[in-house]
Image (tube, rainbow, N blue to C red):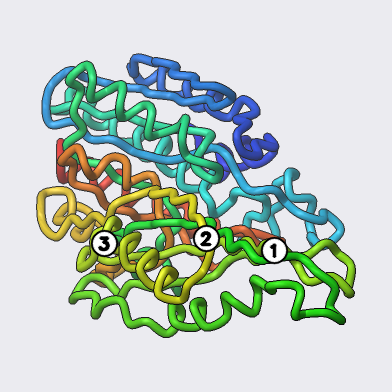
């Protein structure tokens, strides 16, 4: 049986920058096939998706993850080559170590140990992997779930291996996530010479008060599980590059991370009313990438919390903070969805790393979760 650190190293050395998989899923499929999983490939566009299932009975448990990673950036900024996994002082360095090839390796190690001990387990177990989580997330998990729904294949329990831990392994688990709504706002003005502003209309000046109001608006209070809705500007673009030209158009990208206290169409209506009140000539392209979801109770949550307490000595904090995950595509089907993974301190950073001891312990927690559900 493979140790999780060895499989993690095998995956890290493959430069699977979104949407490339670089052969990662083929390595995993080989392990799963040896465990009796039926392998099904669901490629869409440039994206590689793996659906592997063992058993035909309900309930169906699914490990959900991704093999793609974000770019490494300047390799000279790394202390270790990002795609040459390096172990030093009990840490494994490499792009994707935490997000989330380490988690995927822990999946497989847990499955090998569980199936060796319980080959005739009840229910069914599946693994769903995509190479489109760090990108647009259009041709990955979203498409696979739609295909499963179309043929009546229903996931009951979904454990997402995203790095959810804050200060120590499994101190937090995600029992839900906020919704995500992105807007690309274009405000039209009139280009002109900076020395003759009376002949131009500067869209930057026109937009300032509206953007200030959006930033200062208190959207909701959140609730006991979800923080309040937040608005953040992410990009601003205007001008020709010359310092003596008033720009003719302003483009602003922004994002709402919203709680269940608001609906996304309510946010859209509120924003557009505000911009009209400021008498702006504008258009907005909206992209809604996920509804809020929450698993407040259920068999999966009980099993994950008990397994975590067994191996860490503490009950994890239930949280909905952070960004989105592909769990947002599974939750609307009625599945119980929980996220539990490694520390997120170094994700997307240079010198991304994980503690090998945490990787082993995470594999144990995953295995114990399976045992409590199907043992």
Alpha carbon separation for disc pair 2 and 3 = 19 Å
Mark 1 surroundings within 10 Å by alpha-carbon count, few (fewer than 14), some (14 through 19), many (20 or more): few
Mark 3, residues whose alpha carbon is within 10 Å: few (<14), some, or many (≥20)? few
Q: Position of residue 54 (x, y in %)?
A: 27, 21
The reply to whether residue 354 is in sight is no
- Which of marks 1 and 3 precedes in the sequence? 1
Residue for badge 2: 282
Q: Image height check: is 19 above or below 332?
A: above
Label 2: which secondary element: strand
Please identify the quarter of the rendering in which residue 237 is found.
bottom right
Indicate which disc, 1 or 2, sits on the residue closer to the N terminus: 1
For the residue pair 222 and 22, the one nearer the viewer reads as: 222
- For the residues labelled 3 and 1, the Cα–Cα distance comes to 27 Å
Point 49% across, 55% down: residue: 284
Q: Quadrant of the C terminus?
A: top left
Q: Which residue is mark 3?
A: 266
Query: Crowding near pointer 2: few (<14 within 10 Å), some, many (20+)?
Result: some
- The correct choice, above or below, for 24 with respect to 257 in the image is above
């Amino acid at each position: 049986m493979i140790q999780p650190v060895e499989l993690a190293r095998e995956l890290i050395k493959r430069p699977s920058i979104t949407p490339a998989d670089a052969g990662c899923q083929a390595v995993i499929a080989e392990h799963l096939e040896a465990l009796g999983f039926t392998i099904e490939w669901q490629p869409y566009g440039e994206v590689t998706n793996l659906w592997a299932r063992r058993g035909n009975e309900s309930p169906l448990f699914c490990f959900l993850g991704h093999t793609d990673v974000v770019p490494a950036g300047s390799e000279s900024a790394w202390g270790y080559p990002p795609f040459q996994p390096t172990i030093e002082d009990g840490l494994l360095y490499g792009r994707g170590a935490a997000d989330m090839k380490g988690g995927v390796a822990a999946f497989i190690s847990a499955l090998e140990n569980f199936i060796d001990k319980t080959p005739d387990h009840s229910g069914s177990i599946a693994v769903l992997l995509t190479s489109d989580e760090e990108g647009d997330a259009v041709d990955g998990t979203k498409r696979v779930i739609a295909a499963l729904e179309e043929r009546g294949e229903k996931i009951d329990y979904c454990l997402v291996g995203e790095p959810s831990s804050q200060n120590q392994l499994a101190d937090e688990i995600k029992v839900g996530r906020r919704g995500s709504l992105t807007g690309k706002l274009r405000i039209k003005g009139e280009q002109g010479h900076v020395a003759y502003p009376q002949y131009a209309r500067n869209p930057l000046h026109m937009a300032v008060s509206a953007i200030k109001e959006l930033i200062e608006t208190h959207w909701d209070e959140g609730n006991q599980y979800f923080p309040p809705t937040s608005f953040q500007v992410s990009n601003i673009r205007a001008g020709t590059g010359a310092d003596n030209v008033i720009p003719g158009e302003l483009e602003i990208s922004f994002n709402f991370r919203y709680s269940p206290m608001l609906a996304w169409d309510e946010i859209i209506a509120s924003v557009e009313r505000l911009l009209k009140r400021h008498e702006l000539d504008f258009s907005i392209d909206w992209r809604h990438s996920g509804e809020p979801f929450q698993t407040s109770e259920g068999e999966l949550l009980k099993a994950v919390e008990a397994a975590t307490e067994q191996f860490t000595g503490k009950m994890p904090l239930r949280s909905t903070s952070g960004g989105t995950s592909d769990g947002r595509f599974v939750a609307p089907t009625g599945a119980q969805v929980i996220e539990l993974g490694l520390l997120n301190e170094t994700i997307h950073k240079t010198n991304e790393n994980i503690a090998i001891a945490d990787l082993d312990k995470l594999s144990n927690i995953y295995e114990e979760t399976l045992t409590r559900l199907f043992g």
